[in-house]
Image (cartoon, rainbow, N blue to C red):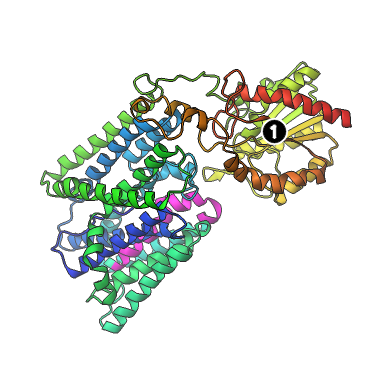
Amino acid sequence: MSNPANQPPPQKTQRIQFIDGLRGLAVLIILCFHLNPNLLKGGFVGVDIFFVISGFLITQIIANEIKDKNFSFARFYARRIRRIFPALFVMLSASAIAAIFLLGPSEFRAFFKDFRFASAQASNILFSKTVDYFALRHEASPLLHTWSLGVEEQFYFVWPFLLYFSYKFLGLKKIYVTLTALFFLSLGLSEYLLQTTPLHAFYLLHARAWELALGGIIALRIIPPLTKAQHINLASLSGLILIILAVLLTDQKTFPGIWALLPCLGAGLIIYSAQQKTGIIHHALSNKALVWTGLISYSLYLWHWPLIIFFKMADTGSVEEALTIPQQIGLALASFIFAAASYKWIEQPTSKITIHPKRIIFAGLLIVTVFILSSNVMKRSAESNWRVTYKLDPVETAPNNLFELCASPGSAFNLNDCIIGPNKDKYEVILSGDSHASHYTPAVLKWAQEKGYTVRLIMRGACQAWVRSEYPPMRDGAIDTDCMNIRDEFYKTLSAQKSVKYVFLSLKLPKINKDIETSLSDLSQLHKETVFLGSVPIFKQNPHNCMVKNHLLITQLIPRKETAESCLSIDQEFSDKELEPTLSDFVPALGKYRISYFDPLPYMHAAFDQEGHFLYLDVDHLNQYGGLYLGGHLIEFMNKLEHKS
């Protein structure tokens, strides 16, 4: 989100008022989208409007000071710190307090990892590796919205140097060459990354720089301004229409890339058309309500998302639950109250501070350092006695014994330790797939031990280890050579090891596609007894976290809406909905390739067994106990299968 305080020092003018109104419109679009994603399909484009505004205002400030020979890097960064840091770090502090009272251990650790990166103004880099902004799932971060602050802070770090040295060597009138080149290079890169690594296209500065550069191009008046009223009104109305179209039509799957031109050009046209005088749209944007919303928009953006996520966690424990209309209204009002308070008692007072720039920069760096160090300390307190009164069995909160050795990313796949049984040279069984194959390891080993078989594990977390594809697998924006090697090893082993009789496969919620069909067909030609191990029921939230949340100290004072008993039971409707695409699409296709299907659903009714052991590691993975529990049922299944054949 743009820093809504990025306006130049001059007195309030009609022009600044309409920009505040445009800010207000942008933040309202974002707020509505986050409260109810179905209300505004493309509400996330509000951030793009902010990027254009920010690029315009920051470039205007820097260019004017360079032209007046009055530019100072120290003063520029001191202004940014003074306007951004106070409200941001108050929000981070309040969120940390909420996390102490509301989050389970794994959520708590994840929060303080996000907290560390948000403090360093780099959360966009973290999220670009792991988090789909549009997939509001159980792991949604209360600090997810800070990604846009990271983009802007990184922009502030680079932009002054780019403008200053472009001016020094090219002159102010020729800076447009630099900005125009940057605009097209970044836009092209954004579209390319959207096809190859979408998370990078969404979160990272080099894929978003063109949006900020567009604002800069307008600020430098490279394009001659409009002077006639009808031209001004036509341009600004066209800009507003483009924004409306972006909000109503933008598809998450094709964004940002070329589609981001809609909101960005829309905002750009509104700003550009007012360079000489304002028109009807500018006057509409200058109404008091929108201008006031624009003034508090930075704080409104900072507070609304943590309020939404923490409320959901406190209410039902699941961030996937849709908010009711009364809840949406209540959270919107709360967001405005927090934002107004933040603007009045944090933003306004700190904007008047007149300390030497170098001292402000030092104080800012000190605050960042303290918050980063404190996040490391807090992360270790996830299960401390002062926070949690319930302790989990370490076996229940860890994957099976062989996961780290044989299935974690980067682990060796040809170790003797990943061949388990009496005959390591001639093994009869292969288990392959991703982490969902790994959680079946105890079950397959239990069956194999009874039969006297040896099992070879060829698997990797987040890797479709047995699926052939013409495209290389990707991880964190790069080709996953580790996964490629695993795939090669799987098929090489099947061809070379004639002793293999049984092949067990698994994947997370697979759907039929060309690659999977080709792989299933290839496997069916090998004449091995092949079994696909199905997905277990899926929980709305991590049952460990649920149990711990019911034993947080705050729960002793304020009972949770969802009791330990209810959140340890499987929500059948939710689980069925998650599993339905696989059960209706993938599973029926297995028979075509003579592949058997082991269905765990009839045996899994809760998060624990009769002895009280947790069976789940998280929402959809089993721990060691869970794998062993299914082992008995797998033995029965395999005995029936062998009897049939």
Q: In terms of secondary structure, what is the magenta stretch mainly? A: helix
Say whether residue 17 is left or right of residue 381. Answer: left
Residue 154 in view in this figure: no
- Residue at (56% x, 32% y) in the render: 569
Taking the spot 31% from the left edge, 82% from the top edge, the residue there is 231
| Residue drawn at (62%, 25%) of the image | 626
Q: Is residue 274 above or below residue 207?
A: below
Residue 203 vertical position relative to residue 547 in the rendered view, above or below: below
Tell which residue pokes out farthest to the top in this image: 422
In the picture, measured across the screen, residue 110 lies left or right of residue 363, that is right
Write down the region rendered in magenta: 193-218
Quarter that holds the C terminus: top right
Q: Quadrant of residue 311?
A: top left
**x then y, percent, for residue 121:** 33, 43
In the depicted structure, whether residue 516 falls above or below residue 165: above
Q: Residue at x 24, y 73 (%)?
A: 283
Residue 166 image-quadrant placement = bottom left
Residue 81's quadrant in the figure?
top left
Identity of the amino acid at label 1?
Pro
Please tell me whether residue 3 belongs to the stretch shown in magenta. Answer: no
Please identify the residue farthest to the left as the structure is shown.
354
